[in-house]
Amino acid sequence: MNDWWQSTFPKGRQSLEITDSNGQSVIIAYGEKGTGKPIILVHGMGTWSYSWRHNIEPLAQQFHVICFDAKGYGFSEKPSYRESSGHQINELQQIIKKLCNEPPIVVSESLGALITLATAESYPELFARLVLMNVPIFPQDLPTWSMRWIAHLPLNLIKTVDDLRLVRLFAPIVRWIVQRGRNEITANGVQTSLEEAYWLTYPYIEFPNAITKFAEDLKQGVREIQCLKRGEPNLISQIQNGLSTITCPTLILWGEQDRWFPVSNGEALHTCIPNSIFQIIPDCGHQAAGGRPDVVNLAILAFLSKTNLM
C-alpha cells in the first residue's frame, strides 16, 4: 500500500513541535500542498488528515492547503498523560501561528469545528474566514451507542488492550466494521473501499495509545455534556456564550441527513454568529467532507469568492 502522505503532499509528512497545556513538547504531523492564501483543515474526533482526502487537491488548485493531525490522532504524538478540557484550543492556535504567515481560512468538521469556534473566540486575530461543518454545538449526548459504550469502559482496561496491541489480531474485522459504519455518517450510499478502510483505521491498529486517547476524548465529552445539562461550568456553554463575538465571515455547512446532530442545530448556530451564511448539503450525513466532497468544495470556493478571497 502506497504511503498516503507521500502520494498526497509534495514534501510528504512533515513534523511540527508545539507545547501543550501540560507544558510538554509534542510532535504534530502535517502536510501541505499548493500556493496562495493558507487554508487549514481541522478534522473531527476519531479521524485524522486522511478524512480530507477528497478536498485537498481541489482546494490546493487555488490555495495553500495545510492538513494536520491533532494531538492524539493519526500520525501525531499520543502522550500517555491525561489531557485537560479544551487543550485542543491552545494547540490549534500554536499550529496556526507556526504554519501560517497570515491569518488563514480555517475549514473544520464536527469536534474540530467546535474547537475552531472556541479558538476563534479566544484568538480572533488568527482567522480570516471560517468554514464550519456539522458542529456539535448543542449536544444532548454522544451520538452513537458505541461511543457511549467506550466512554463508560474503565480507561485502564482500554489502555491495557491498547498497550498489548490486541486490536491487530482483529484488524480485518475492524476494517469491515468501519466499512459498514461509514453508511451512518455519509447517508448517501457512498461505498468505502478496502484501501479507505485500511487508512481510516491505520492509526488505531498500528500506533500505541491511539485507542486510549480516543476513549479519553469520549469520556471528556460525556463529562462536558453532563455539566452542560446540569448547568455546571463547562466548555460547551462557554463556546455557546461567545458565538456573538465571532466577526469574521463564516460559512456553516450542514448535512441534510445528519443523524448525529440535526439541521436545526445548524440553523440555531447561524442565528448566533452575526456574519454567517448557512447552507444545507443535500443527500449528506454527518461527514460532509467525505460524503459529498464535490458539493463541499464548490461551496467553500464560492464562499471565498463572494468574500473576496479569490
Image (tube, grey):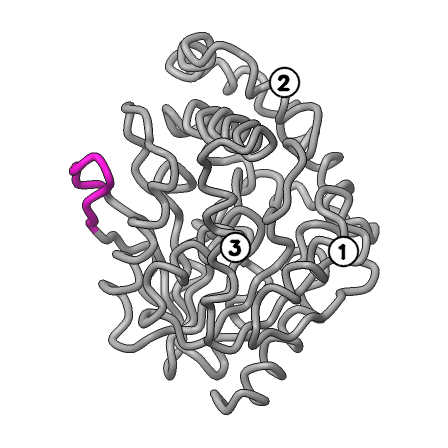
Q: Is residue 298 visible?
A: yes
Q: Quadrant of residue 294?
A: bottom right
Marks 1,2: beta carbons within 8 A:
no
Query: Which residue carries the number 3 mark?
Result: 113
Residue that numbered label 1 is attached to: 263
Q: For the residue carrying disc 1, how many other residues have a C-alpha within 10 Å: few (<14), some (14-19), or many (20+)?
A: many
N-terminal label among 1 and 2: 2
Tell me how far mark 3 sits from mark 2, CA to CA. 24 Å
Q: Which residues are magenta?
A: 17-26
Q: Left of 85 or right of it: where is 288?
A: right
- Secondary structure of the residue carrying tag 2 is helix
Q: Which mark is residue 207?
A: none
Q: Nearer the viewer, residue 298 or 242?
A: 242
Q: Amino acid at mark 1?
A: Val
Q: Is residue 204 visible?
A: no
Query: Which residue corresponds to mark 2?
Result: 149
| C-alpha span from label 1 to label 2 | 26 Å
* For residue 305, above or below residue 263: below
Locate residue 181 relative to residue 234 in the image: left or right: right
Q: Residue at x 45, y 51 (%)?
A: 115
- Closer to the N terminus: mark 3 or mark 2? 3
Callout 1 secondary element:
helix
Q: Residue at x 41, y 14 (%)?
A: 159
